[in-house]
Amino acid sequence: MRRRGSPRRRADGRCHGGPSRRLGSPEVTAREVAERVHRNAAELADECAEVAKGSAGLLSMFDDAAWNGPAGGGYEGTLGDGVEALWYDAWLHGNDIRSSLDRPADTGAGMRAALSMGANAPIDIYA
């Protein structure tokens, strides 16, 4: 499994297609970077906040059957597994950013949830 691409694409329903359009592929990642290259930090933060708000509303619409059903978009696990993997990625990359800014890592509830995901994930999550 590879990274799943931008939250904006997931929230907008634009996560589909073959290998060259698969979230996290080099082609998709390059496109997403190109779409944001001229944005400043405040604009990117605003996009993240907007997507987080929309995602929270979307997630509350899933029932147990949906959470336990296939994720789609090329992800081999359940929807619940896929969302948990996305939260893991967000936590991990948030700490990457904190580290580059010489800020302390998130060692609270986010870390416990992320480590739980990593411990239960298929081996190829790190590929």
Image (tube, grey):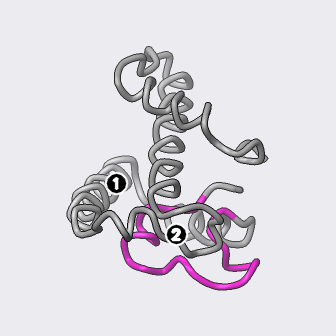
Residue at 42% over, 79% down: 13
Rendered position, 91 above or below 69: above
53 vs 94, left or right, is left
Crowd tier of the residue under label 2, counting other residues whose Cα lies within 10 Å: few below 14, some 14–19, many 20 or above: some
Going by the numbered disc 2, the residue's amino acid type is: Ala
Magenta-drawn segment: 4-24
Q: Main secondary structure of the magenta part?
A: loop
75 vs 56, left or right, is right
Mark 2, secondary structure of its residue: strand
In front: 69, or 19?
69
In front: 50, or 80?
80
Mark 1, secondary structure of its residue: helix
Q: CA distance from mark 2 to mark 1?
A: 22 Å
**Nearer the observer, disc 2 or disc 1?**
2
* Contact, mark 2 vs mark 1 (Cβ under 8 Å): no
In front: 42, or 11?
11
Q: Tell me where residue 105 appears, x and y as whole percent.
A: 46, 18
Res 48 label: 1
Going by the numbered disc 1, the residue's amino acid type is: Cys
* Residue found at the very far bottom of the displayed protein: 17
Q: Tell me where residue 82 appears, x and y as whole percent.
A: 52, 57
Res 22 label: none
Instruction: Tell me the residue that label 2 is attached to.
Output: 71
Q: Tell me where residue 74 appears, x and y as whole percent.
A: 65, 73
In front: 23, or 120?
120
Rendered position, 42 above or below 7: above
Sequence-first tag of 2 and 1: 1
